[in-house]
Every structure is written in C-alpha cells, then in structure tokens.
Amino acid sequence: MKTKGMRTLGLYVHIPFCVRKCHYCDFLSFSATEEVKEQYVQALCKEIVSFKEEETSCMVTTIFFGGGTPSILKGEQMERIMKAIKETFYIDENAEITIEMNPGTVTKEKLEQYKRIGINRLSIGLQTTDDNRLQLLGRIHTYEQFLNNYQWAREVGFQNISVDLMSALPKEEIASYQKDLERIVALNPEHISSYSLIIEEGTPFYDNDEILHSLPKEEEDRAMYELTQTLLQKAGYHRYEISNYAKEGKESRHNSIYWTGGEYLGLGLGASSYLLADHAYIREPREKEHYAYRFKNISSMEDYIKCPMTPCEEREEWTLIGKTEAMEEFMFLGLRMRKGISEEEFLNKFGLELEEVYGNVLVKFQTMGLLGWTGEKKKRQIYLTDQGIDVSNAILSEFLLT
C-alpha cells in the first residue's frame, strides 16, 4: 500500500473504568463490574470495526488508550481491542501506541502482553511519591507499588515511559515537591508531565473547605512551577509544552496532535474527535464555510452498549468549526508548545498570511519581549519567550478574532 501523501490520523480510545474515582477527578470514569467491562469491550470493538465500511486514505500515526484506567482491563481484553484496530485502520509501522496505567493495576505478565500486542509507550499516573498525599488524593496505590511497576516495565523492555506528577497539592510545601521531582528524575523516565492541581466543580475536593484552605498560596504554586523547569532542564529534559518535559525525541506525539490542530478520531464512551470537513468519516451535510468538525461519542454507558454502532449513530455535541475559529485554535494551542507555530503551516492550512490576520498582535508582543521568532520572513517559527509563557493566558486571549 502506498503511504506517501496519506493524511495522518491519531486514535484516542477511551476506557472509562477505574477501581474508584480520585477526589480531584472530573473525567468520564467510574467503577464497574467485570460483566459491564466485558460488555463495553465488545461494544467498543463493534464501534472500531464499523469504520471498515468507510473509504479513507488515512495512516494512523498514534494510538492513545486513556481513561479512567485502561490498565484495569484484562490483558486479553486489550488484545481484542488492538486486534480490532489493526484489522480496521492502516497503522504506521512506527506508530506511537500509548496506554495510561495506574500503579497497582498491572502485573509483569500484563505488561508483557502489552508489549506483545504492539503497545510501545506507557503513561504512568503517579501524582506524588508521598503515600500520605496519595491517600489524600484518593489514589489506590503506594509509591512502592509504583516503583515495582516501573521496574517491571523496564524489565519487560519498555523504553518510552512517561510519569505524571502533580504540584500544589493540599498541605504540600516546596521541599516535598522537590523530593518528588528528584525521586522521579533518578529513575530516568523518557517523559515527565507536571501539572498544578486544579479543583474542579463536582469533585469531592470542590466542596471540602479543609482541602481548599490547605492548598499552597499562589506564590508557592509559582515557585513549584519554576522549580520544575529548573530541575528538569538540569537533568536533561526539555520543556516542549507548558507542562510537559521530555528527553530528546521522546515528546508525546499523540498529545502534539491536539496542540498542532491535527486530526484525531475518538473511540469509546464520550470520546472526542476533531476532523477536517472533507474527511471521509464525516457524514453530516457539509457547507463551504465549514473548516472542521468537533464531536463526541454518547456518554451513557447503557446507550453505548446497546448502540448498533454505525459510526454516525453514537456521536453527539457536533460543533461546526469555521476558518476563523480554526485559526484561533491553531494559535492558542500551537503557542503552548515551545517551538511555537509556523508561518508557512498557517498559510498552507488557511490560505492567508499570518501577518495579514495577526500582524498587530504579533508586533505588540514581540516589542514587549513576550514573543520571539526564528527563520526567514514568511517561513518563521513564532513562539512564546520565557516571559511570554509566564503570562501566556493574557497573551493567548488576544489571538481571538471574534
């Protein structure tokens, strides 16, 4: 099969199950019986293979199993899902295939099975190395369980591992967060994500006054953010996105699709998709002014399991995206990445010169030292400077055109 010139596509596969919901989590996830999990796997496989009917020339370059806790499924269930994907889509031989896993939900045998079916990247949700704070967050594991799972992953042969950390946790001080960072750096994972805890409405933390009053002050949160950059850079990690750090060549290719306006197809309960208007998977009426579509699968487990699973019937929340909105998203998502955005790519995507649309804004922030660029005019790479990243929210809001 010819691959040159094929458009690329990322697949996101949602596994909504977890042992129990963490106190800060607002994702579509919940605990379930083994019977419901099996019913879901069967329904998910049906949804996947339904795309065999569609004519498409896409090459899947990334697959990401997210949740919930995908590693809660049995190894043979994951094997069936991967089999359905491989039989339905054309998968790049060098595709990045990631599974999110929580410590305490895998065995060495399950990790070996992941490796055998083609998964080549692990994203491990640790959050903190302190057992007391893990318990406070509602996590199901200990730091020792994480270490055991990490060691098994290395022994099995995984050479691309990401570890998730959280900062600004309740009752956390800078010294304890630094200990988290140093412990993880000593393990030498290929990728580290570090996010500040955000208290979301509808979570147990949101209505807990004791938790809210025990959060670090804004200046402490800021100090942890700066410490992350300093310590990880010294350890050989480069920040390629505001909260993500990687060894050279180990950046998350799947997440980069989201930040650069690439196309992705969501599979499973409540999974989101973003496809250009001319994509073969789009069955909605198309208008000339439509640039892309964003949509979600249904979020009711009962309805999803019963759904006849033709690609259009389980979708909801259709959003039609015009060129103006697409340009806005290209800017404020792309500028989250340290390399920034490409003038040439902007022109190729939208048929307009970047300066024609955003000239005044670019000059304003370049003059203030908040934006920088490299390369020749019309082929420049435009990025936020370190000072620009510090005030990124204020800057990015000025790229809204409406």
Image (cartoon, helix red, strand yellow):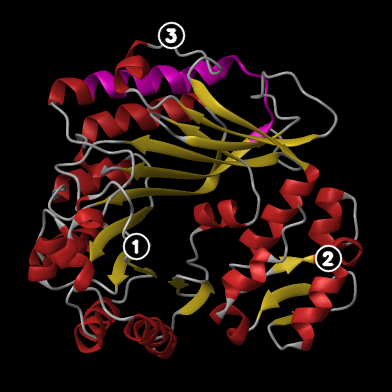
Q: Give how far across and how far down residue 21 sits, in percent.
A: 19, 45
Q: Is residue 296 left or right of residue 18?
A: right
Which contiguous range is marked in magenta?
38-58
Helix, strand or loop at label 1? It is loop
* Residue marked by disc 2: 358
Q: How many neighbours does mark 2 have within 10 angstroms: few (below 14), some (14-19), or many (20 or more)?
A: some
What's the amino acid at mark 1? Ile
- Image quarter of the N terminus: top right
Q: Looking at the picture, which amino acid does disc 3 mark?
A: Pro
Q: What is the crowding at mark 1: few (fewer than 14 residues within 10 Å), some, or many (at least 20)?
A: some
Lateral position of residue 262 relative to residue 209, left or right: right
Tag of residue 198: 1
Q: Is residue 366 above or below residue 287?
A: below
Instruction: Determine whether the residue tagged by mark 2 lies in a helix, strand or loop.
Output: helix
Residue under the image location 76 percent in, 30 percent down = 278
- Residue at 59% across / 57% down in the picture? 259
Disc 2 to disc 3: CB gap under 8 Å:
no
| Residue 374 visible in the displayed image | no
The residue labelled by disc 3 is 308
Residue 389 appears in view: yes
Front disc: 2 or 3: 2
